[in-house]
Amino acid sequence: ATRDTMVFAAVDTVVLKPFVPVEVYRASRFVYTEKFGNVMITLPDAGKKKYSVQFFKENRAPLFEIKDIHSSSLVIDKTNFIRSGWYWFELYEEGKLKERHKFFIPKDF
C-alpha cells in the first residue's frame, strides 16, 4: 500500500501523483548545536566505551575527525566548521557506526 494519489484529469485520463513525504528534522541526542552555535557532543558512558566522530561538509567531503572521546560532554567551537550551514557527522562506538546525522551551524548576528 502506498500513499500515492490518483486523480481524474479528464473523463478518460487518470494522473498518478506520487506521495512525497515531508522531511522532518530531529536533532541528534549525541551531537547537536547549542544556543550559541557551538557543537555539543554528549556521550553518557564515554568513560567506559571508545567513541570517535567524523565530521563532513554538506557535500559529504571529509572535514575533520576526533578519534578518542573520553569525556561525557565535549564542546567544539563553531569556528572549526569554516562557515554557517549544514554539516554531517558519523559517530562510532567501539568502532561500529552508532549514528549518522546532520546539524546546522547558524550565522553570527
Image (cartoon, rainbow, N blue to C red):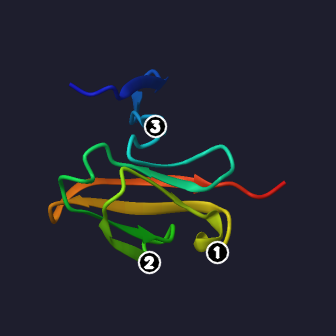
The mark tally for this picture is: 3
Q: Relative to residue 32, is residue 29 drawn left or right?
A: left
Q: In the displayed structure, would residue 89 be above or below residue 82?
A: above
The image quarter in which residue 71 lies: bottom left
- Spot the residue most to the right: 109
Q: CA distance from mark 3 to mark 1?
A: 23 Å
- Disc 2 element: strand
Decide which of 19, 92 is in the foreground and name it.
92
> Label 2 belongs to which residue?
64
Q: Relative to residue 17, is residue 53 drawn left or right?
A: left
Q: Earlier in the sequence, mark 3 or mark 1?
A: 3
Q: Relative to residue 106, is residue 93 drawn left or right?
A: left
- Disc 1 element: loop
Residue at (44, 62) in percent of width and height: 88
User: What's under tag 2, amino acid-wise?
Assistant: Phe
Decide which of 23, 78 is in the foreground and name it.
78
x then y, percent, for residue 24: 47, 35
User: What's under tag 3, amino acid-wise?
Assistant: Arg
- Disc 3 element: loop
Q: CA distance from mark 2 to mark 1?
A: 12 Å
> Label 3 belongs to which residue?
26
User: What's under tag 1, amino acid-wise?
Assistant: Ile
Q: Residues within 10 Å of mark 2 (few under 14, many from 20)?
A: some
x then y, percent, for residue 61: 44, 78
> Label 1 belongs to which residue?
82
Q: Earlier in the sequence, mark 2 or mark 3?
A: 3
Q: In the displayed structure, would residue 45 be above or below residue 71?
A: above
